Image: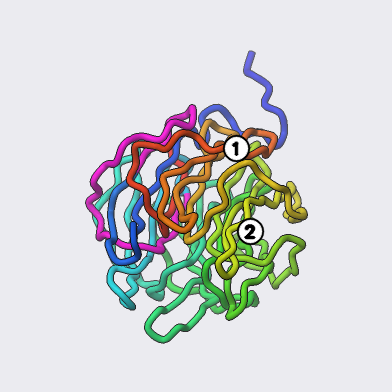
Amino acid sequence: MFPIIPAGSATASERQKGIFGFGTITGSDFTDATNLVSNSGVVATDVTGVGTARMGPAACEYGGDKGIFGFGMITSYVVVGMTNLVSNAGVVASDVSIVGTARRSLGACRYGDDTGIFGFGQIVASNTRLSTTNLVSDAGVVASDQAATTGTARNAVAACEYGEDKGIFGYGDDGLYCDITNLVSNAGVVATDVTGVGTSRGHLAACEYDGDKGMFAFGQYNSTRPSISNLVSTSGVVASDTATLGTGRGDGLAATQYGGDKGIFGFGSDGSSTAITNLVSNAGVIASDQAATTGTARKALAACSFN
């Protein structure tokens, strides 16, 4: 007999492990370090990467069991269009140049069965905010810019999956912090703005949980870093704020799935760079701070699942 898997549940083989990668400690000392996340949510020590050190990239799963980091800033005001693939063993590959517009502080998520999307972001030198998106094939190839979406151009966004095969971009900075969300169909089409119900903020993170739901959490507006989350239903509806137990932080913390149906938020700044992590149950509850990981405290990093 084959096991019966409830609708909306991740299979045991999906999204078992995660990886945090890249970032900066102070804002000028960029790193290519990565930290693997086990299927029980344990964050490993730093692994020196092979990609170009940078801050403000994004990351997502592709191909069913692999990941990709993309874009980011390598020196003050210099942004790049490059990616680093992550194997299903969590090994990060060397840089690949891509054809998409170079930018930082964008979001990324899986959509469909095994494809991904990068979206929004900022060209730092000109302070130009974008609504540009780039699709990721099931082989990890990033396509050229899609025609500008109907979403508001902004940076400091987060993105995650929901509904098993769809995605959502949310929040960010369009000149002011906002609570806008944009749904992504299972064909990678980004919808028009939906005004959210949560606290307007940017530099937050998001991840899937329970196989078919999502969560935005933490972030910042001005100098305030609220410890809150906003759940995303199986139909992409964002709920009002829920207070969490974790230390409030922003400045580009990251989040990913692990263990098939759970999530983890990690790193970011509470005024100084941290190595704090918070596990997310398959009911969408964020746990209190774990003891500091053995990873380097940093901010403006990215994370995705693999395996």
Q: Nearer the viewer, residue 205 or 85?
A: 205
Q: Which residue lies under the disc numbered 2? A: 168
Residue 307 shows in this picture: no
Residue 12 picture quarter: top right
Q: Position of residue 97 (x, y in %)?
A: 29, 66
Residue 168 shows in this picture: yes
Q: Is residue 304 left or right of residue 81?
A: right
Q: Nearer the viewer, residue 242 or 231?
A: 242
Please tell me how crowded label 2 is: few (under 14), some (14-19), or many (20+) other residues with Cα within 10 Å: many
Please tell me how crowded label 1 is: few (under 14), some (14-19), or many (20+) other residues with Cα within 10 Å: many
> Dividing the image into 4 quarters, which one contains the N terminus?
top right
Q: Is residue 46 left or right of residue 15?
A: left
Name above or below for residue 61 compared with residue 5.
below
Name above or below for residue 252 compared with residue 209.
below
Q: Position of residue 236 (x, y in %)?
A: 73, 54
Q: Residue at x 74, y 68 (%)?
A: 194
Q: Is residue 46 left or right of residue 123?
A: left
Q: Position of residue 174 (x, y in %)?
A: 59, 78
From this viewpoint, which residue is outermost toward the bottom?
Answer: 126
**Mark 1 belongs to which amino acid?**
Val
Instruction: Tell me the magenta residue range.
Output: 35-60
Q: Position of residue 55 (x, y in %)?
A: 36, 62
Q: Nearer the viewer, residue 300 or 165?
A: 300
| Residue 59 forms part of the magenta stretch | yes
Q: Which residue lies under the disc numbered 1? A: 280
Total residue callouts: 2
Badge 1 element? strand
**Mark 2 belongs to which amino acid?**
Ile
